[in-house]
Image (cartoon, rainbow, N blue to C red):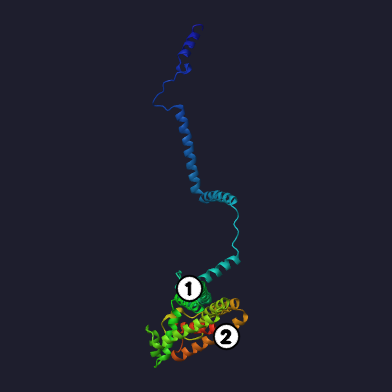
Amino acid sequence: MTQDRPQDDDQKGQDPALEGEPAEQDPGQPSAETAVSASHIDRTGAAVEADATATESHPAAHDTATGNESATAEAGRTASEPPRKPASPTASAYDRFARFWWRDLLAALGFFTRLPVRAPAIPLSEAVRAFPLVGALVGLIGLLAYIFALRLGLSVLLAAVLAVTATAVLTGALHEDGLADLADMLGVRGDRERKLAVMRDSTIGSYGVLALVIATLFKVGAIADLAVLPQVASAMISAHVLSRAVLPVAMRSLPLARPNGLAVHAGKPPADSMYWALGLGVVIVLLVGGPGAAIVATVSALVTAFLVAKLAQRHIGGYTGDVLGAIQQVVEVAVLINFVTFS
C-alpha cells in the first residue's frame, strides 16, 4: 500500500489538465463550449418553431397581441402629444362662407376687369353677388386717379377725364362696347334678326360713337361739377357699385335674346344671389353716401335699368351681353347725375 500512493501522486503530477496545460482534444468530438452553444441554439430554435406553430394554430390570438402592443405604443405617443381641439362648427361654416365669397370675387374680377387674377372656372351667374364689390374696386381706382391728378396740380376737369379713363382702361372698355352695340342696334332698321346681327358685328357705327361720346361727356361733366373730393368719392363709388348691382336683376328678369353668346354662357343667377348683390350694393352706397343718397341713387338705378331692359326686349326680345353692358353704362351716368342734383 506504501508503494501504490506514490504511483497515484505521480499520475496526478503527470495529468496535463491538473497542471494547467490544455489537454489535447479529439477533432471528431465537439468541445464543452460548442456543445453548450449548440444546446442553446437548439432550445431557441425549438422555441421559435413552437411560437410559429402557436401563431399558425391561433392567428386571432397572435393578432390580438400584436394589436395590443400597437395600441399601447400609440397610446404612449398620444399621451406625450398635446390634446387637439375639435373643429368648431361655427369656424367651419365661416371658412366655407369666406371661401365661396373669395371664389365669387375672383370670378367677377376676372370677367369685369383686366386685373391679373386667377379666376375659377365657374359660370358667371354663380358670382353675381360679388358684382358690387367689383364696382367698389373700380370706383376706388378711378377716385385714386382723380386724387393723383389733383396732386399733380391739374384742373378738376382734367382730373375727371383721368378718372373716367382709368376706369375704362381697368375694365377693358367692356361695358362701353355694349353701349355702342346697343346704340347701333337702335339706329338700324329691320327685323329682330337684322338687329341681332348688327349687335354681333365687331365694327362700330355712327350711333355707337355718338353714344360713347355722350356718355363720356356726362361722366366727366358730373365728376367735374362735384369737384369736392368727398362728394366725388361718394358719387364715383356709388355709381360703379349700383350699376353692377342691378345687372343680376336684369339677368334674372329678362329672357335671353338668342340661344348662344356671352349671356348664355353666363347663365341665369339664382334668386338669393340676386338679392345678395342688390342688398350689398345698397349697403355700400349707404356707407359712402348716407341714407338719402342711398335711397335716391338706388331708385334711380333700378328705374334706369328697367327702362333700358324693356327697350332691349322690345327690339330683340330679351337681353344679351351687350345689353348688360349698356345697362351698366346708362345706370352709372344716371347715378352720377343724381349725385350732382342732390349735392
Nearer to me, 258 or 295: 295
Nearer to me, 277 or 228: 228
Residue at 39%, 88% in the rendered image:
206
Q: Quadrant of residue 296?
A: bottom right
Q: Position of residue 3 (x, y in %)?
A: 49, 6
Q: Position of residue 304 (x, y in %)?
A: 52, 87
**Left or right: where does residue 215 sit relative to residue 285?**
left
What SS does tag 2 mark? helix
- The label shown at residue 341 is 2
Callout 2: few (<14), some (14-19), or many (20+) C-alpha neighbours within 10 Å?
few
Position of the C terminus by quadrant: bottom right
Residue marked by disc 1: 109
Would residue 257 be seen by someone viewing this image from the given angle? no
Instruction: Residue lying at the far right in this picture: please name it.
Output: 291
Above or below 14: residue 41:
below
Judged by depth in the image, the label closer to the viewer, 2 or 1, is: 2
Q: Quadrant of residue 290?
A: bottom right
Q: Position of residue 143 (x, y in %)?
A: 52, 75
**Left or right: where does residue 103 sit relative to residue 207?**
right
Callout 1: few (<14), some (14-19), or many (20+) C-alpha neighbours within 10 Å?
many
**Left or right: where does residue 25 sit relative to residue 276?**
left
Amino acid on which the number 1 mark rests in the picture: Leu
Q: Quadrant of residue 169?
A: bottom left
Q: Position of residue 176 (x, y in %)?
A: 44, 81
What SS does tag 1 mark? helix
Q: Are marks 2 and 1 in contact (CB under 8 Å)?
A: no
First of labels 2, 1 by sequence position:
1
